Image: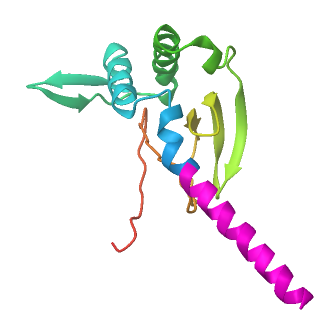
Amino acid sequence: MFKQRLFLIVSFLVVCLAVIIGVLDSMKTRFYIFDPEQLHKLVQQALIANGHLNITDGKLIPIIQQSPNTIRLVIDYITVELQKTIDKRYLTDKEEWIFNNAGGAMGAMFIIHASLTEYLIIFGTPLGTEGHTGLHTADDYFHILYGEQWAFSAGS
């Protein structure tokens, strides 16, 4: 009798937790402060302004760089422009690079913003790296400032 009662209580709590998580997940977009399209435009503007992209006949053409070290100005452009449009309490006030080894991808990251619903980082590695991100509810948007990223899609 006790085991059945305990099972019912645990089952009820699990169902309640699942409902709460579902409701919160459906509301998370209300708390976003970044718009993916605006971030995409900002990255393009930063790359164009610092000589990494050229517009030819309405198409964006990458300009080959001699060194990845030229990306410093692009990062500065992005952070300065974000500070003009996003409330400063949501952005870090100092640049701090943190070594990161997550999912097998090793590199360093600069956290511009982090909250329960979204984060914005600059991630870099001086060498090729590989790893996995796992399954999660986050929406990921990657804007490559320099280099390339390869990804596998399920079913391909």
Q: Say which quarter of the image contains residue 99.
A: top right
Image position, residue 122 (x, y; %): 56, 32
Image position, residue 7 (x, y; %): 80, 82
Task: From the viewer's side, name the closer residue of 2 and 42.
Answer: 2
Asked if residue 128 can be seen in this view, the reply is no
Residue 150 position (above or below residue 53): below
At 73% across and 76% down in the image, what residue appears? 11
Q: Is residue 17 magenta?
A: yes
Residue stretch in magenta:
1-23
User: In which quadrant of the rendered image does the C terminus lie?
Assistant: bottom left
| Residue projecting furthest to the bottom | 1
| Residue projecting furthest to the top | 84
Image position, residue 91 (x, y; %): 61, 19
Task: From the viewer's side, name the closer residue of 17 and 143.
Answer: 17
Q: Say which quarter of the image contains residue 130.
A: bottom right
At 64% across and 43% down in the image, what residue appears? 107
Q: Is residue 70 magenta?
A: no
